Amino acid sequence: MEQWVTIRTLKKQNSELGTRQIADLLGVSRNTVKRALRSEGEPKYVRTPVVNPDLHPFEEYIFEQRFVKRLRGSRILNDLRSKGYRGSQSAFYRYLCTLQDPVKRTFKRYETAPGEQAQFDWSEYTVLLAGILTKVYVFIFILGFSRYRKYRGSLSETQGSIFEAMEKSLYAVGGVTERVQTDNAGSFVVKRAGGGYHWNPRYLAFAAHFGFQVSRSEFGHPWSKGKVENPFDYLEDQFIAGNAFASFEDFINKLSAFETAVNNRVHATTREAPALLFEREEKNALKALPAHAYVGLTETVRKVTADSLIAFDGSRYSVPDHFALREVWARVSMGYLLEISSTGGLIIATHHLSPVKGKVIIDERHYTRHKIERGNWNRLSVTFLERFPDHSVFLDRLKAQKRIDPAYHLTRILDLLAFCDRVHLEAAFSACSQYNTYNVNFIKGYLENHATVLGSGEKPGPVAGLPTTPPITRALREYSDIVNQLSLPLTKGGSDELHKR
């Protein structure tokens, strides 16, 4: 079935693809490709029925055990063998599959209250990106009450990408539901050695951080998360099939536009547009988001060089020159972006991952302090007041407190506009007034702990759990004692004692 769908989708996306090319891409024979293209109906496996005389004496018994007592097939098989059945296990199960329940099994649609449940899942697609067949993954996060949804495109389906997609979806909708329904993927559940399943500890830690209850579909019960399963069919038909994209960024942008259109069309069940129903009834029912983003195991520490570069996976990437010679955090986002954060959790740079090792990826905006000429206080003051007309008092106090070289501090403050939000800079100016401290280093420290950097998307500012500089706990008198030891006579004993101290 998967081969049939993939072959026909590839042909729809690019009619010029021949059967040999498709066969090479999928690792199947050309005859398989030809049969799939000729067949309009989905393939079905039909096994020739085999009459098994060994089961004839037990037909009524099997029917009663299966549909009256509702026993499992393994239990019925064991009972049959105790009654003299000598046939094979496979023959028994083939016969069992031919039986039909006289009471047709139906499923009642269930609805959830506002803020009660969200469903999360993803699907894999093969699409044309810049003329190249590329495997992409689309994550869907959908609120059960309003059907308001968020799509996330990715080039990977690692646990880090899965958690990131769910995290960004939570921040995009602005809150947390009581529980989140998922399937039984390895990122969520782990198989026990003795049989059965239990929750993946990392997923439990993720859920505990955001404060939602974990919930999963039972095996063989896909209808329990049908609200997130059904949208994949619509996505396939209305967005994926027949489309080609200039790049992965083009795919992401068009997916975002598709998301907006879907959220604003009338839903067949609720009879309302999901976006309107979300704003009116569900948005305010969501629980508050945590103050900090979740920290997983995908972040790595990197030391910034003097020329404001970090090394990552064989290439080097620039960061704002304010972070030269300092440590930062780096992680791969959704399989194609490199996000670089300060130790306070602020995203300070974002780059596309280089497909070739040994490259140096430079963002010219990271070197802004060299573009504003120092030394002309009057010109810098005019520039500052054009951008911050309500903060002339800050300017006067900066000049009064930094009389030797106020232009240096004002230059570096203007540099911060290249990667920091203006609103948070104004908050930093207020903090300067509160503590009567006017210099660029104080402002940078405030921003690292309180601000959100431009370009950070939906991720919040500070990140919980990141290491910070440890406080000094040694009493100063201990250093005094060591200095006093310098007066010890330079005898062997005195030298040994000083060495121990």
Image (spheres, helix red, strand yellow):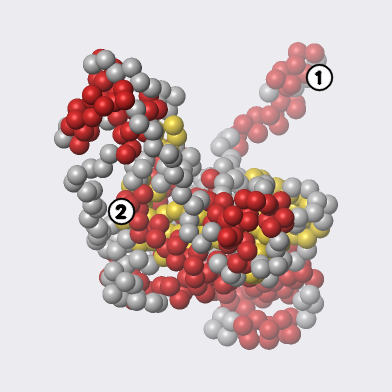
Q: Amino acid at mark 1?
A: Leu
Inspect the image, locate mark 2, and give the three-letter code of the amino acid beneath it: Glu
Q: Position of residue 2 (x, y in %)?
A: 53, 51
What residue is disc 1 on? 490
Query: Residue 80 sits in which quadrant?
Result: top left
Closer-to-camera residue (395/414): 414
Q: Measuring 75% from the left and 60% from the top, which residue is drawn there?
A: 318
Q: Helix, strand or loop at disc 2?
A: loop
> Crowdedness of circle 1 by 10 Å Cα count: few (<14), some, many (20+)?
few
Residue ID for mark 2: 178
Q: In this picture, is 169 found above or below 265?
A: above
The residue at the far right in this view is 358
Crowd rating for badge 2 (residues with CA inside 10 Å; few <14, some 14–19, many 20+): some
Vertical comparison of 57 with 346: above or below = above
**Depth order, front residue of 419/286:** 286
Q: Residue 96 location in percent, x, y?
A: 31, 34
Foreground label between 2 and 1: 2
Residue 429: % across, % down:
55, 72
Residue 112, located in which quarter of the rendered image?
bottom left
Q: Is residue 191 left or right of residue 414?
A: left
Sequence-earlier tag: 2 or 1:
2
